[in-house]
Image: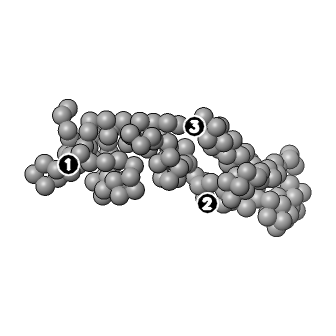
Amino acid sequence: MDHPDIAEVARRSGVPASTLRFYEEKGLIASTGRRAGRRVFDPGVLQRLALIAMGRAAGFSLDEIALMFAPDGRPRIDRETLRAKADELDETIRHLTAMRDGLRHAADCPAPSHMECPTFRRLLRAAESGAMSAPEGGLSGRSAPAAAGGRRAPAPRPADG
């Protein structure tokens, strides 16, 4: 493939042209010129878009992803940043696992009402204290404690009964 235009890049990458223009504004990708009024890109843009997609799927912000490219456009991914994101994902997984287990227990609990279930009441107390709040920034965003280097207390795990 020579230098694909924006429509071809959008088709091949699955990224809408509007997003490609936004990425260009943010400095994540760069067009190499225009052909028939349309932006054209270096063929390497598809690999760069794949790296951006991987970063977004892992929960990195666009600003964080931008730092993962050298000025010449080549990837320069800091391994410590990857470790920190993996740790953050581990914490999110622990949080979601505890929430899933709590929901399953509440759905299957043999107590006549949830308020009569000791496990449900323990979960309710944890929620009242804020220990079961959703991670800040949603499930894919960085939490303030993690971004500041702090650690969020793990969500309580439901016990049997």
What residue did someone put label 2 on?
A: 137
Give the residue type at disc 3: Asp
For marks 3 and 2, give the CA distance: 23 Å
Name the residue: 50% across, 53% down: 63
Give the residue type at disc 1: Gly
Name the residue: 31% across, 35% down: 44
Compare marks 3 and 2 and give the one earlier in the sequence: 3
Work out whether 123 lies above or below 1. below
Q: Residues within 10 Å of mark 1 (few under 14, many from 20)?
A: few
Give the residue type at disc 2: Gly
Q: Which mark is residue 33?
A: 1
Q: Which mark's residue is nearer the viewer, 3 or 2?
A: 3
Q: Nearer the viewer, residue 123 or 133?
A: 133
Indicate the quadrant containing the N terminus: top left, top right, bottom left or bottom right.
top left
Q: Position of residue 34 (x, y in %)?
A: 16, 50
Q: Which mark is residue 65?
A: none
Work out whether 41 lies above or below 112. above
Q: Position of residue 20 (x, y in %)?
A: 32, 52
Name the residue: 67% across, 54% down: 147
For marks 1 and 2, give the CA distance: 37 Å
What residue did someone put label 3 on?
A: 78
